[in-house]
Image (cartoon, rainbow, N blue to C red):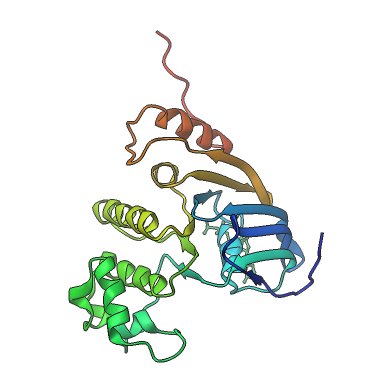
Amino acid sequence: MATDLHGPVTTMATATPDAVRVEGLTRSFDGRAVIDGLELTLRSGEFTALLGRSGCGKSTLLRVLAGLDREIEGTVLVPKRRAVAFQAPRLMPWKRVWRNVLLGLPGKPQRAVAESALEEVGLGHRSGAWPKTLSGGEAQRASLARALVREPDLLLLDEPFGALDALTRIKAQQLVAELWQRRGCAVLLVTHDVDEALLLADRVLVMRDGVIAHDTPVGLDRPRTVGAPGFAGLRSRLLTELGVEQPAAPSL
Ligand SMILES: Nc1ncnc2c1ncn2[C@@H]1O[C@H](COP(=O)(O)OP(=O)(O)OP(=O)(O)O)[C@@H](O)[C@H]1O
C-alpha cells in the first residue's frame, strides 16, 4: 500500500469503474486519529450516503475527498472534476447569485453558464438577486448550482438539507435525486438522517472508530417512500449499526 505522508490527494481519469479509491487513510488532530486506516471505494455514478455518530469523522473524510484537507496519510484517488456543497450555503453576500455560482471557475465563464445551472435547480428567476434576499431553501439550491457548473463526476454533500424546514427538505431531497439521475455523477451524502439515506442512496455506509464499519446496499425500487416494503427493516438495521436502541416489536 502506498503511503503518502502529508501527501496530495491524487486525481485520476474519470473513465474508470471507481469514482473514488481510498486506502489506509489516516487523519489525526493533536495526535488523535479521527480517521484511522480507512478503506473506501465509491463506484462511478453511485449514490452513497454516509452515516455515523456526531464527531466520528464524516466531515473530515468529505473534506479530504474534496481536497480541502491534505494533512493525511494513505492513498486517496478522486476524479479531477468534483464539487462540494455544505450545510451552510456559503454564498458571498456582496456578489449576486449568478456571480456566486461562477465563483472559482477557471477562465471567464459567461452568465449564461450560471443561469443554465440555476434553471436546473429551479432558481433561474433569482439569478440577479442578492444572497440575503434568498430563502434558506433557495440559498441551498444556489449552492447546488455552484456545484453543478463544475460538471462534477463526484458530488460531495455535507448535510446539505440539515438547516432546512421539513417541507423544503423533502423538496431539496427530490431535487438532488433528480439531478443525480440526470447527471449520472457519483454522490457522497453525509447525513444524520437514516430515512434520508434510505430514500436517496444505493448504498449506506456507517462510519465508526475511524473506519467504515458497515456497508449496506439499498436494493429498493425508486422513487422510494418510507412506507415501501423493506424500508422499515433496513431502517432498523441501520439504527442498530448506529448503536440506537429500539423498542422491541409488540408481541401478538
Ligand atoms: N480542524 C480541526 N482541529 C481539531 N480537531 C478537529 C478539527 N476538525 C475536526 N476535528 C475533530 O475531529 C473529530 C471529527 O470531526 P468531524 O467534523 O469530521 O465529525 P462529524 O462526524 O462530521 O461530526 P458531526 O456529525 O457532528 O458533524 C471531532 O472530534 C472534531 O472535534
The N terminus sits in image quarter: bottom right
Q: Quadrant of residue 249?
A: top left
Side of 18 where 115 appears, left or right: left
Q: Split into 4 quadrants, where in the image is the C terminus?
A: top left
Along the viewing direction, whichever of 69 and 55 lies nearer the viewer = 69
Q: Nearer the viewer, residue 251 or 15?
A: 15
Residue nearest the observer in this picture, 124 or 28: 124
Which residue is situated farthest in the bottom direction here?
108
Spot occupied by residue 211 in the image (x, y as percentages of width and height): 68, 50
Q: Quadrant of residue 139?
A: bottom left
From the top left corner, tell me how far across and down residue 111 is, in percent: 29, 85
The residue under the point 34% across, 36% down is 226
Kindly give the residue lying farthest to the top in the view shown.
252
Does 191 appear above or below 29? above
Which residue occupies 59% across, 41% down?
215
Q: Nearer the viewer, residue 148 or 184?
A: 184
In percent of the image, x 58 and y 37: which residue is there? 241
State whether residue 242 appears in this view.
Answer: no
| Ligand 1 quarter of the rendering | bottom right
Q: Is residue 95 left or right of residue 219?
A: left
In the image: residue 150, left or right of residue 127: right
- Viewer can see residue 184: yes
